[in-house]
Image (tube, rainbow, N blue to C red):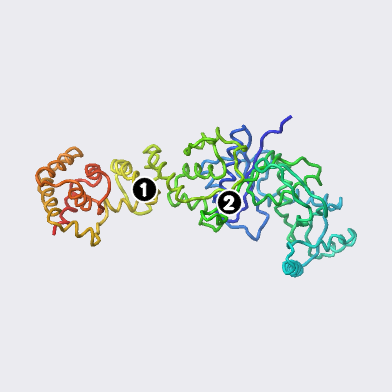
């Protein structure tokens, strides 16, 4: 009988959610939704030296912001909790003692400076740096006595010294590692906390994880993990290792906090829909040329079989292009709501009717929501002109346009978009001016730029009184 599909996203609370980790979370989420399985969030917080306060809250907020709702995890207790590894320490110690008793693991008493010297000597001999197993042959009785006497130690896994291990990966097919390339992995550190490798295996088994979907960087750890499964007599989950994310120059994508964090992209004005859509296509393809997918559509389309082996380039310009499409095409009410926090943060307060009108017009001209305050300055702020713009404004033809418009705008108090369209046509006839000689001077007076939306649409936002002030400013 097939095991129920249960997948997990298991980040460490060491900072912001990197876009590579977001992709891992997304693929696990999509596979669970496609198969009717369960998506579990587990916090791997046993490395206390790298723990960052507030990282868990940031992670939960970011997953919520992009719509990746987990089925079990912190705050959503299921039958497999607790979901913080730091709260599961007795489980790991129990399994460690089993490995020690069965002589499948051993105590290691090497000091940090000894290990550093060992690695340096190996590197100087052009050898792959790894533990030389010097504590492996200490008799169990002697090792226990040293532990009971309080000597500092770690616990290491006994890895076979010859032969090889072959396993199947859904993305990469058959993979083989010679055991001589696999280190005697530390399972418990000197502070009494387990390493990722032991806690990961124990938790994945106890939480009944059916598929492990994670980054390619963990591929070399698989032999140690499969060895542990064998030591405990457990059946391992199926494996799928995702391709690396690359910079445009094909180097590995930076993990510096803030550079490529999901939270940072959202703060810059990228929409969750665009971020999820773009990240989904980094290493997975749909079998068609289609590029735009909602999260619901991705849930239906996703398949582990269509994950690629080759590294995927993370191109910020492509993400911006996709983001601009979503800004233009999502419902206007949606974009207005998303825009308001950026406008408020910039101290821009606009009445509701004008807000909707202006966002409808301006969303065609931005790639990020964070660009909106700068564009709004052109509509409501003080205009300043450079030398080239000043030259256009000062030309006799431009000055004639400004005087003509001021005269006409003063003739009536109430103007609408249709009235302004008539004024544009009248200006062409009366002053014999058209094209850029007409539009450049007027747009400069309206928004300080020679290019932009149609004049009647601009007028709807700026209004008669504000336009009169701006035209007066342009008179020389």
Side of 349 where 334 appears, left or right: right
Q: The residue tagged with tag 1: helix, strand or loop?
A: loop
Q: Position of residue 447 (x, y in %)?
A: 25, 51
Q: Secondary structure at mark 2?
A: helix
Residue 129, x across and y down, in percent: 73, 63
In the image: residue 19, left or right of residue 466: right
Q: Nearer the viewer, mark 2 or mark 1?
A: 1
Query: Looking at the image, can residue 224 be seen?
Result: no
Q: Are there few (<14), some (14-19), or many (20+) residues within 10 Å of tag 1?
A: some
Q: Nearer the viewer, residue 77 or 101?
A: 101
Q: Residues within 10 Å of mark 2 (few under 14, many from 20)?
A: many
User: Which residue position holds label 1?
Assistant: 366
The answer for how far apart the CA atoms under marks 2 and 1 are is: 32 Å
Which sits earlier in the primary sequence, circle 2 or circle 1?
Answer: 2
Dot 2 and dot 1 residues touching (CB under 8 Å): no
**Residue sitting at 57 percent across and 36 percent down?**
302
Location of residue 387 with respect to 362 vertically, above or below: below
Query: Quick one: which residue is furthest to the top in this view?
Result: 1
Q: Nearer the viewer, residue 373 or 274?
A: 274
The picture places residue 267, in percent across and down from the top left corner, at: 45, 51
Q: Quadrant of residue 271?
A: top left
Kindly indicate the quadrant of the structure image that contains residue 412: top left
* Residue 108 spot, x, y in % from top left: 81, 61
Query: What residue did someone put label 2 on?
Result: 56
């Amino acid at each position: 009988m097939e095991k129920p599909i249960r997948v997990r996203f298991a980040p460490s609370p060491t900072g912001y959610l990197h876009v590579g980790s977001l992709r891992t979370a997304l693929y696990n989420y999509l596979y669970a939704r496609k198969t009717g399985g369960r998506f579990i969030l587990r916090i791997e917080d046993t490395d206390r030296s790298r723990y960052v306060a507030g990282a868990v809250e940031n992670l939960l907020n970011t997953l919520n912001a992009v719509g990746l709702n987990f089925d079990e995890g912190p705050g959503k207790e299921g039958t497999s909790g607790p979901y913080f590894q730091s709260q599961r320490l007795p489980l790991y110690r129990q399994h460690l003692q089993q490995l020690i008793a069965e002589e499948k693991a051993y105590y290691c008493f090497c000091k940090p400076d000894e290990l550093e010297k060992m690695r340096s000597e190996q590197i100087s001999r052009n050898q792959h740096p790894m533990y030389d197993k010097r504590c492996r042959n200490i008799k169990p009785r002697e090792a226990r006595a040293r532990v009971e006497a309080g000597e500092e130690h770690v616990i290491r896994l006994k890895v076979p010294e010859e032969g090889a291990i072959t396993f199947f990966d859904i993305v990469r097919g058959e993979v083989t590692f010679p055991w001589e390339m696999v280190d005697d992995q530390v399972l418990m550190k000197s502070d009494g906390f387990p390493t990722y490798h032991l806690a990961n295996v124990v938790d994945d088994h106890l939480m009944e994880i059916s598929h492990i979907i994670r980054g390619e960087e963990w591929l070399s750890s698989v032999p140690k993990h499969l060895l542990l499964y064998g030591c405990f007599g457990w059946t391992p989950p199926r494996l799928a290792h995702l391709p690396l994310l690359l910079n445009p120059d094909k180097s590995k994508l930076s993990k510096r906090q803030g550079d490529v964090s999901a939270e940072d992209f959202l703060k810059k004005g990228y929409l969750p829909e665009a971020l999820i859509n773009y990240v989904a296509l980094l290493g997975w393809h749909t079998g068609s040329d289609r590029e735009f997918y909602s999260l619901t559509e991705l849930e239906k389309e996703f398949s582990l079989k269509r994950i690629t082996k080759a590294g995927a380039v993370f191109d910020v310009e492509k993400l911006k292009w996709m983001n601009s499409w979503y800004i233009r095409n999502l419902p206007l009410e949606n974009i207005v709501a998303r825009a308001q926090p950026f406008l408020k943060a910039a101290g821009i307060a606009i009445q509701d009717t004008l807000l909707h009108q202006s966002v409808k017009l301006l969303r065609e001209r931005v790639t990020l929501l964070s660009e909106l305050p700068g564009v709004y300055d052109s509509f409501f702020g003080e205009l300043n002109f450079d030398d080239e713009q000043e030259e256009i404004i000062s030309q006799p033809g431009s000055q004639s346009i400004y005087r003509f418009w001021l005269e006409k705008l003063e003739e009536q108090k109430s103007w609408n978009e249709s009235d302004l369209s008539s004024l544009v046509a009248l200006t062409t006839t009366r002053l014999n001016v058209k094209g850029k000689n007409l539009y450049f001077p007027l747009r400069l007076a309206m928004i300080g730029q020679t290019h932009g939306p149609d004049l009647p649409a601009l007028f709807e936002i700026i209004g008669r009184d504000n336009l009169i002030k701006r035209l007066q400013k342009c008179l020389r």
